[in-house]
Amino acid sequence: MSDKPPDIRACFIGLWCLLPQGGQFTRRTDETGKVVIVTGCNTGIGKETVMELARRGATVYMACRDMKKCEQARQEILEKTKNRNIFSRELDLCSLDSVRRFAANFKKENKQLHILINNAGVMDCPKLLTKDGFEMQIGVNHMGHFLLTNLLIDVLRSSAPSRIVILSSLAHRFGSINMVDLNSENSYDRSRAYCQSKLANILFTRELAKRLDGSGVTVNALHPGVVNTELFRNWRLFQTEFGKYLLKPLFWPFVKSPKSGAQTSLYAALDPNLNHITGQYFSDCKPKKVGSAALDDKTAKFLWTESEKWTGLNGSTI
C-alpha cells in the first residue's frame, strides 16, 4: 500500500464532476428480440444509447447522415458489446426524400419496430435551410422526425406494445410557436428558433399520444440534461476568446457526460413501469412538468396541421 497522501485536488475535481450526472437507469432488462431505431447516433447521447441497447441484446438500426462516422461508431459498439445485430443506415433529416427512403427501406427489411428514439438534433446554428427550404432547426429537430415517425407508425402499431421516445430540451420553456412565421423567413434569431423547435417536440409528443391512445404505442418526450456533445459546436459564447479560455473550462465540470445524458432516453425506452405511460415529459429518469406553452392544445393542433402540409402528409391517418 502506498504511503503517498491522496491528491486532494484530484479527489475534489472527481467529486465535482460527479455532481451534475443526474439520474441513472440501473434497472436490468433483456432486450433480445427487440428492434430499435436511433437517429443521430454516431456520437454523443445517441451513440451511448445504442451502446447500452446493444449490451442488453437489442437489434439496433443506427440512422445517421454521415455514414463514415456512423460505421466507425458501429464498429466500436460491435467490438465492445459483441452484439452483431447493430446496423448502420443512411438518414438525412435535412431531406424529406432521405427520410422517405430510409422508412421504405427499413420496412422492406423488417416487419417489426418496438422502439423509435428520435435523438438527432441541431442547436443554435446560423440561418441555414434544409434541402426542402425549412429553417434548419425546425426542419431537423421537428419536421424530419415528424415525417419519419408518421411513416413508421404502421410497423410500430403492428409491433405493439411499442414506444416512441422524443428528445426535447428544457429550452422548450423559453420557446413559442410563431404561427405567423414558423419558418423564420421574416426574421431569424438562432436561440429563439432552437427553443421553438424544442417546444415543437413536446407539442408533437402530446398530440401524437392522444392520436395513438389505445393503440399500444406510447410516446414520451425528455430533457437529457446539459450534456457534453457536439451540439455545442455552434454555441456563440464558446467561439469567443473569453468563452474558449475562461468560461468553457469552468462550464464543462457542470455538464453531464454523454453516457449520463443517455440515461433518461434508456429509461423512457426500456423501463417496464412505463408500459402504459404516454404523453409525458421526463428528466433525470423522473417525470417533470412542462412549460405552460407545451400544454396549449390549440397550438399543438396548429403545428400538426402545418407539419402535415410541410412534409406532404396531408390527411394523415393517425
Image: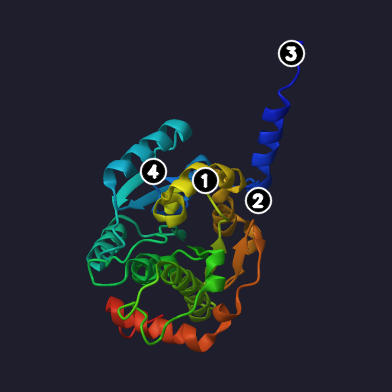
Amino acid type at image mark 4: Ile
- Mark 2 or 1: in front is 1
Query: Where does the C terminus fall, quadrant-wise?
Result: bottom left
> Mark 3 or mark 1: which is in front?
1
- Mark sitting on residue 267: none
Q: Distance between the Cα atoms at labels 4 and 1?
A: 35 Å
Give how far across and how far down residue 136 sits, in percent: 33, 66
Disc 4 residue crowd, few under 14, some 14–19, many 20+, Cα 10 Å: many
**CA distance for labels 3 and 1:** 32 Å
User: Mark 2 and mark 1: span between their CA atoms?
Assistant: 20 Å
Q: Which residue is mark 3?
A: 4
Q: Quadrant of the N terminus?
A: top right
Nearest the eye: 163 or 128: 128
Q: Is residue 45 above or below residue 283?
A: above
Q: Is residue 133 visible?
A: yes
Q: In the figure, 146 relative to 239: above or below? A: below
Question: Could you tell which of marks 4 and 1 lies nearer the N-terminus?
Answer: 4
List the residue tagged with mark 2.
22
> What's the mark number on residue 86?
4
